[in-house]
Amino acid sequence: MSIHHCLHKSISMGKYRIQPCSRALPNGAFGAQVSVASGRGSASTDRVMRFVPEFATPAAASQYALDEGVLWVQRQTSNLILF
């Protein structure tokens, strides 16, 4: 069982809600994870991503998760056309 620390409040970017958290790892370090949710009710989706890097503090892990969540949303909402 792992303990989750959600130090940052969730932020909204357009239709997305980003909630970063950290989790205590067995070796004493902290892992980062982020939830990116959109929609409401039965039309809602929630993507949870866990990341490989380990961090010394829950705050550092949570900040990394927030940064990655924001990047993911930016990629989803960009209008890039690749040829």
Image: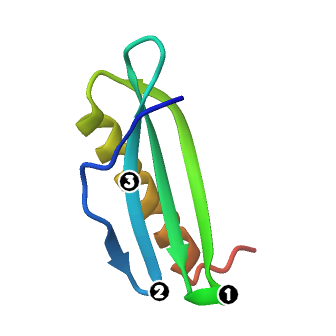
State which mark lies toward you, 1 or 3.
1
Task: Work out how far the residue at label 2 is from the one at label 1, CA to CA, in angstroms.
Answer: 15 Å
At label 1, which amino acid type do we have? Ser
- Near mark 3 (Cα within 10 A), the count class, few <14, some 14-19 or many ≥20, is many
Q: Which residue is mark 3?
A: 20
Camera-nearest residue between 7 and 14: 7
Say which quadrant the C terminus sits in. bottom right
Reading the image, the residue beneath label 1 is: 42
Question: Label 2 sits on what residue type?
Answer: Lys
Q: Within the image, what quadrant is residue 62 found in?
A: top left
- 38 or 1, nearer to the observer: 1
In the rendered image, residue 77, in percent from the top left (x then y), is placed at 53, 80
In this picture, residue 14 sits left or right of residue 82? left
**Residue furthest to the right:** 83
Which residue is located at x 54 percent, y 69 percent? 75
**Quarter holding residue 66:** bottom left
**80 lies above or below 7:** below
Badge 1 element: helix
Task: Please tell me which residue is depicted at 55% across the width and 88% down the height of the picture.
Answer: 40
Identify the mark at residue 15; answer none if there is no mark: 2
Kindly check if marks 1 and 3 are in contact, taking CB atoms under 8 A apart as contact. Answer: no
Residue 71, x across and y down, in percent = 45, 61
Please determine whether, in this image, residue 59 is positioned above or below residue 77.
above
**Tag 2 secondary structure:** loop
Q: Is residue 7 above or below residue 29?
A: below
Q: Give how far across and how far down residue 37 sits, in percent.
A: 52, 72
